Amino acid sequence: MPLQRAASTTVTAGDLLSAYRPGAAFLSSPSTTLLGQGGLAVLEHAQDVADALGDVITEDGRPAVAMGAIPFEPGSPARLVVPRVLHRAEGTRAREETRHRALPGTWEVKPVPEPREHAEAVRRALDLLTAPDGPDTAPRKIVLARSLRLTGDRPVDVARVLANLARRDPDAHVFAVDLPPRGGGRRTLVGASPELLVAKRGTHVTSNPLAGSAPRSADPTKDQRAGVALLASEKDRYEHAVVVEAVAAALEPYCRTLDVPAEPSLVRTATMWHLSTRVTGELDDPRTTSLDLVHALHPTPAVCGTPTHIARAAIGDIEPFDRGFYTGVVGHIDAAGDGEWAVTIRCADVEDTTLDLFAGGGIVPGSDPKAELAETSAKLRTLLLALGVDRPL
């Protein structure tokens, strides 16, 4: 590909959020916000990124960037774009002051599967966890998801959904990226993920796995009790430890030092409490890229289960839908290999008048089907409230 030139500007995160229009790529973390417009290259394979970025120079002399999403299933096409124009906002993202604006119109809601069927799926997963065939064939954890398909009476205003998500969860990784269309309309992956899969800058690496969750309450006293109970929960701490163990094992071969806190902490979103462990390290080889680390980590037990191949097979047998880009990764990488990638959760796959929403939960010994159903309902509220839909699920 001939050498191409990309423009780059630096503005505020609020400016970029206001400037977003469907067709652009928007990625915002608490430290950096990017808005990419136009496309010098569209890539289906992450291994092509280095060559594509090597063919681009930027007007400000900073490394060129590829932005987009990688799906859950290995071998499925990614969607990564090298934007023609890249706008950046560095530093801590301010809380958005724009008011929440519900989307107009009415929605038809179809659960996939039905709630009672999801509870039965959890029971099936629990049977697999306790199968007497031995540790080589029985999973330690399986993450099961369910979906809601919302069909509206007019095209979805993706820019408004994005702004509502940024306002409600200012500490989340908020994103909107184009996906390959399935029908005639534009297709967008939009969401607000609380979970950093990996960030790499120079030789410094950070991963922040989340596992073990509890719904929040509007009552401050009950809400605080829910967080304290989650931190003390033996079942949730086990679920979390499985994920942290896997993340540390995946990063260790790349790092000369690795710091893994012995105890989890609590983090909160607008709708959920989560157990969190922030893992940090220094790379042994500075040429290791953020995508190298993505491939080593993805999928973590937080979204798949463990052992990975056994849990993934169980998901394929039990879940009645294709996850697509849900529980994949979304983020960016520059020509120096630095980048930031979030786990694609709390998201919607939007096309024309329809949205497919997803939420999942980790099933381990001691999981209760009713509680797991309630957890997915609470997680789905992140997107439902961004749409202005507030109803029991």
Image (cartoon, rainbow, N blue to C red):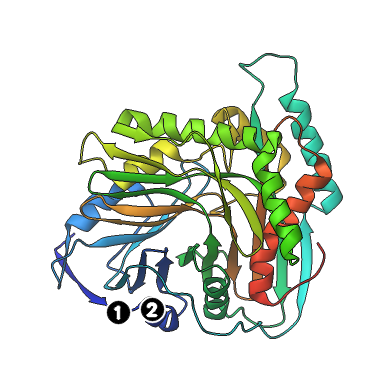
The kind of secondary structure element at disc 2 is helix
Measured as percent of width and height from the top left, residue 237 is found at 63, 36
The kind of secondary structure element at disc 1 is loop
Q: Is residue 64 visible?
A: yes
Q: Residue furthest front?
A: 221
Q: Which residue sits at x=34%, y=78%? A: 12
Looking at the rendered structure, the kind of residue marked 2 is Leu
Q: Is residue 185 visible?
A: no
Tell me the distance, in whole angstroms, between the alpha carbons under discs 2 and 1: 7 Å
Q: Which residue sits at x=33%, y=28%? A: 253
Left or right position of 198 against 163: left
Q: Is residue 94 above or below residue 320?
A: below
Counting other residues with Cα less than 10 Å from the Cα at mark 1, is it few (<14), some (14-19), or many (20 or more)? Answer: few
Of mark 2 and mark 1, the one earlier in the sequence is 1
Q: Is residue 98 above or below residue 86?
A: below
- Image marks 2 and 1: residues in contact by CB distance under 8 Å: yes
Q: Image quadrant for the N terminus?
A: bottom left
Q: Image quadrant for the C terminus?
A: bottom right
Q: Which residue sits at x=51%, y=35%? A: 244
Looking at the rendered structure, the kind of residue marked 1 is Val
Specify the quadrant of the image occupied by residue 242: top right
Judging by the rendered image, the residue that carries numbered circle 1 is 11
Measured as percent of width and height from the top left, residue 230 is found at 68, 45
Judging by the rendered image, the residue that carries numbered circle 2 is 16
User: Which one is nearer the viewer's eye here, 146 or 9?
Assistant: 9
Counting other residues with Cα less than 10 Å from the Cα at mark 2, is it few (<14), some (14-19), or many (20 or more)? Answer: many
Q: Is residue 145 above or below residue 159?
A: above
Measured as percent of width and height from the top left, residue 311 is found at 62, 32
Left or right position of 217 against 89: right
Task: Name the mark on residue 71.
Answer: none
User: Which one is nearer the viewer's eye here, 322 or 249?
Assistant: 249
Left or right position of 39 against 4: right
